[in-house]
Image (cartoon, coloured by chain):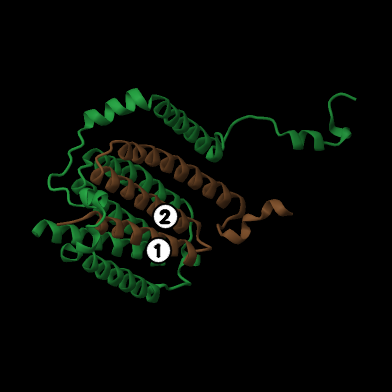
Amino acid sequence: MLQVYFIYLVMCLSLLSACCVICHSNAVYSVFFLCLCFVSTAILWLYLLAEFFAIILVLVYIGALLVLFLFTIMLIDLKIEYQKNNKFFFFFIFSFFFLVVFFILNYYFGINYLDFLKTDPYMHKNMNLKVPYCLPLEILAICLSVQYLLEFALIGILLLVGIIAAISLTFRGSQNRKVQNIYQQVKQSSNISLFK
Amino acid sequence: MLTVYNFLLFSCCLFFISLIGMIINKNNIIILLMSLELSLLSVNTNFLIFSYFMEVAEGSLAVFFILAVAAVEVSIGLAIIVKLYRKTNKISIDQLNILKH
């Protein structure tokens, strides 16, 4: 029973930090709350026996993507735009509403209220699993490398295209390169040209 | 004991929070991208829930692909934001119609 309470606590932490993300007026704090939301969801994924994906979520998302968000916010000075709107009121309303809905529906679909669902044998079988199904990483790797090899390769190509696109969008070249300025060259009047 | 409904309620609430975040932050591209990340996280949680309760391995594989696509999408989106900031010195949705003129 302690485990169930812990999972509820983690869920509430994740929902509250998600409300903080969308309601905070400063984007830096939003990124930190997004980090907290990802960490608590990774704990939830650990309960669902997806340890590999929990590690991937922490490493890839918090290690790479949220740092990318932070760097972008540091590159862009947005303090003037953000200080205007204060969404503190929204935060209380949203968090209260979502937590109330979450707890009421959880209570409604709790242990004692599952009797009316037992008419459907298929759902009954799937909901009341006594022994949790362990999904080892080997099954995942075999499934990925045998059955879904083409998709795996396509994901690699997609990541390569993403790298090339992101770099070519933001790359400006070195500052002191000696490339000719075509506009300035054509703009010259014929009086100062070398060959007449 | 936790059933599939408790987890599904969690991911549903997370998805609606991200949807409301997209609505109330209409002129803020960075928080828009963050709510997009939240919605993708809720979709991933949904996939993992059904992969756990129905004992199917393909749900976890979908999470793998969605994570990669989300990483690519966010990196390109942030690159576009940086490029836009260099052009116009501020980012807002209202100024995204430069191509119209």
On the question of residue A43 being in view, the answer is: no
| SS at mark 1 in the image | helix
Quarter of the figure with residue A134: top left
Q: Could you tell whether A124 is left or right of B72 in the image? A: left
Q: Position of residue A5 (x, y in %)?
A: 14, 61
Left or right, B94 with respect to A136, comes to: right
Rendered location of residue A133, percent (x, y): 18, 41
Q: Which mark is residue A22?
A: 1
Residue at x 86%, y 23% (from the top left corner)? A195
Mark 1: give few (<14), some (14-19) or many (20+) Cα within 10 Å: many
Instruction: Out of A169 and A110, give the one closest to the viewer.
Output: A110
Query: Viewed as shown, does residue A57 lie left or right of B93?
Result: left
Residue visible at 55% across and 57% down in the picture: B91
The quadrant the C terminus of chain B occupies is bottom right
Badge 1: chain ID: A
Residue sitting at 43 percent across and 31 percent down? A155
Q: How many marks?
A: 2
* Location of residue A95 with respect to A117 vertically, above or below: below
Q: Which residue is mark 2?
A: B34
The residue lying toward the viewer, choosing from A66 and A46, is A46
Tell me which amino acid carries mark 2. Met
- The brown-tinted chain is B
Image quadrant in which you'd find residue B15: bottom left
Task: Indicate the chain coloured green by its letter.
Answer: A
* Image vertical order of residue A156 relative to residue A25, above or below: above
Kindly identify the amino acid type of the residue bearing the numbered disc 1. Ile
Q: Are marks 2 and 1 in contact (CB under 8 Å)?
A: yes
